[in-house]
Image (cartoon, rainbow, N blue to C red):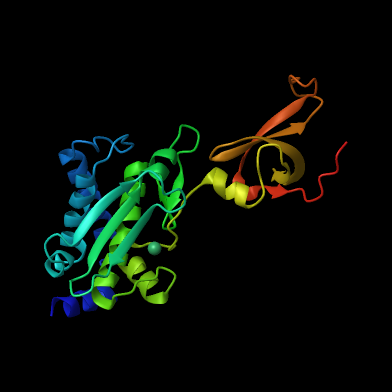
Amino acid sequence: MPTEALSRLLLTREPGEAAVRAWTDEIATDLLGRSSHVREPNFTEIGQDDLASLFTAYDGRFLDGLCGGILGPGTLSFRLSGRMTRAGGKTTRFERRGHTPRFEIAVATSILFDGFGEDDREVTACGLPCRHRLDALQRIFEHELVHLAEFLCWEISHCGRARFRGIARRLFLHRAHTHQLITHSERAARDGIVVGSRVNFAFRGQPLTGRVNRITKRATVLVEDARAPRWSDGRRYARFYVPLEELRLVEADRGA
Ligand SMILES: [Zn+2]
């Protein structure tokens, strides 16, 4: 039974970091070479046929082509969604009475295209940092492929459960199982740090307090300093670039 071969593979295969990196790089290079939309790592267009190419490439390299062998003709479709705003992807199993089930893998273009602006290129998907959109697309697709493979073997698939997490970690080195792409500024906002927040941080061992002026990969924090240049509000500030994880929100912001 091909589903038995697939389930055995899913539960045991662990290609290791070097092979995973080599295979995913080959898949990226192939896509960039062949696609009529995805022509550069920070591509601005993508087609459904690109998702179909990714499926064939990933299934072939990582899953011995078993998913393609199990799926009947016309039972897997691909969709690009401009409306999904939280999840980077979604895989759905459609049960049809008296028919073989049908599957759809959707990828959120809204999230892909929003995620890599000039100021916030660094995005995390599946717990891994993404250098560009193509990295993010591949991580999202890998996550969805694990859903599809689980559906084919066991009819249900939940990415919060141990089986899914084990497969995603062994096959693709994923460190997290969320569908979300998280940008640095989003992560900071989740910790309550936004532009205007008062924050503490240490600079050369000295505790400083300032106000966040800008958030990209790091935060720009302005700290009042009599020796520093005067700003438009008439006060003098020294400017510090601080990694977001080193900032602590000043809890009670006592107003003037
Ligand atoms: Zn999932």
**Residue 211 % position (x, y):** 73, 37
**Residue at 46% in and 43% down:** 122
**Residue at 24% in and 42% down:** 47
**Residue at 42% in and 62% down:** 175
- In the drawing, does residue 246 fall left or right of residue 146? right
Q: In which quarter of the image is ligand 1?
A: bottom left
Q: Quadrant for residue 93, please give it.
A: bottom left
Frontmost residue, 186 versus 249: 186
**Residue 20 % position (x, y):** 27, 59
Q: Quadrant for residue 240, please give it.
A: top right
- In the drawing, does residue 102 fall left or right of residue 168? left
The quadrant the C terminus occupies is top right
Classify 187 as above or below 100.
above
Classify 108 as above or below 237.
below
Classify 240 as above or below 9.
above
Query: Can residue 131 be seen at all in this image of the molecule?
Result: no
Query: Can residue 157 be seen at all in this image of the molecule?
Result: yes
**Residue at 20% in and 60% down:** 76
Frontmost residue, 141 versus 243: 141
**Residue 209 % position (x, y):** 77, 41
Q: Quadrant for residue 90, please give it.
A: bottom left
